[in-house]
Image (spheres, rainbow, N blue to C red):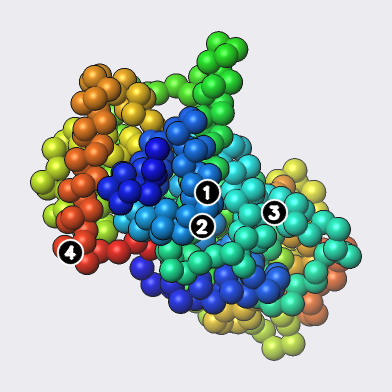
Amino acid sequence: MPGIDSLSELLARVALRDRAAFEHLYRASCSHLYSVSLRILRNESRADEVLQEAYVNIWHGAAGYNASVGTPMTWMINIVRNKSIDLLRSRKSESASTTELDEEAMSVPADAATEPHRMLEDSLIKAKISDCMQALSSMQRQAVALAYYRGMVHTDIASALNAPLGTAKGWVRRGLDQLKSCLEASGVTGP
Amino acid sequence: MNYLLPERLDLLAREYALGTLAGPARRRFERVLHASPAASTAVGIWRQRLAVLDLAVTPIQPPETTWRGIERRLFSRSPGAVPARNAWQAWRGLFSGRSLGGALAGALLCVVLLRMQPGIVGLEPRIDALPQSYVGLLLDKAGKPALVASSRRQGRQLTVKLLQPLDVPVGKVAQLWALPKDGSAPFAVGVVPAKGSAQIVLPDASEKLFAAVSQLAVSFETAPAKAGDAPSGAFLLIGHCVKVW
């Protein structure tokens, strides 16, 4: 992905409290990060809230960014992912304890098992790493996609794919193992 | 449990990066993460691998209110709003309301719009979603497209492009007018060139000016119209002004 150096530079300037650089960084990354959050939370206002908190963290945490553990984009994606997943899960436990389900946010549509799968396929095709997935079984792909794109834990995945917990865990584990070796072999790196 | 045995660490890092490590196990591992560089490195490696899955996910533009919210959270105590000093800052306020995301990509009109300034750091959206804009397509008396006008919803600049040269009489100007949909008096927008393109600086945000405007029109005037002026004669060009969002 292009622009890595530029994002690094921007982040370095943000660490020095450069507000113009911060806005550049926001403009350059917000649509990507918003889609990450929206995908997990599936709710615009909550995704918006997470995005705001994430950029506040980015502003305050830019000085702590460590280039040796990932690109700026990966670093930012993970701030957003973690916040989104935390919010998703806090809402889950909230709804479990009150039994008041927020249908819009929590309902798993009938195609939950296949839609992320399609998104994954799409992503992979665009990223030209589809070869890496050929060896994965359809269930492995779906399990990885549900975890990554929907922030699901193993029990959710098992339930969405109508499989025993151990089986679902196996799909995720083996799917990731294969993905890892293939990506390493093909030299594909993250954003 | 020794979290730092290489194989165990790799498993936990993977689960953590993927998000499947949940509940108390996640919190315990987060404590390990804070204390152990080896653990952060292991998680970093997995994040980088998994981030490949994010590479080609279609970006979705958040509403402009998101940026304003961030500014408010971070800088609301700083003295006053920073005046627009450069193009980026001028960008502020160009969007508002809920983003159309990818939905607009299918709604491309055959007009030239101000494009988002892409590529500054190489991360322009992969979809060419139109920003929320007002667009006018003005026709001449023969019904032939003659002028395109476009402005971002919250922008203060109107881009006009002549699709065919205007035969502006000597000593006159081609004045652009906005016609409110309630039939009230047209108001002057600016002077358009006889050919080519131009940027007209608007006295207010597009949204304020054009929300209730249904048509744009051009007449020849002896001088650029001022606020309160009315068209002196017939319109040479006229067309609908639409919201693109």
**Location of residue B127 by image quarter:** bottom left
Question: Residue A2: x and y, percent?
Answer: 39, 72
Residue A186: which disc? 4
Residue B216 in view here = no
Q: Which residue carries the number 2 mark?
A: A76
**Residue that extends furthest to the top in the rendered view of this protein:** A99
Spot the residue most to the bottom: B170
User: Disc 1 is attached to a residue of which chain?
Assistant: A
Chain letter for mark 4: A
The chain identifier of the residue carrying mark 2 reads A
Q: Residue at x 69, y 77 (%)?
A: B86
Q: Is residue B163 left or right of residue A127?
A: right
Q: Nearer the viewer, residue B191 or B83?
A: B83
Looking at the rendered structure, the kind of residue marked 2 is Met
Please state which of residues B46 and A19 is positioned toward the viewer in this rendering. B46
> Circle 3 sits on which residue?
B70
Amino acid type at image mark 1: Val
Tell me, yes or no, whether the two marked residues, 2 and 1, touch with CB atoms within 8 Å. Answer: yes
Please provide percent x and percent y for residue B138. Answer: 56, 63
Gap in Å between the C-alphas at discs 1 and 4?
A: 28 Å
Q: Quadrant of residue A14?
A: bottom right
* Rendered location of residue B38, percent (x, y): 41, 58
Residue type beneath disc 3 = Ile
Q: Chain of mark 3?
A: B
Dot 2 and dot 3 within a common chain: no
Q: Residues within 10 Å of mark 2 (few under 14, many from 20)?
A: many
Residue contact between numbered discs 1 and 3, judged by CB atoms under 8 Å: no
| Picture quadrant of residue B169 | bottom right
In the image as oriented, which residue stretches furthest toward the left? A135
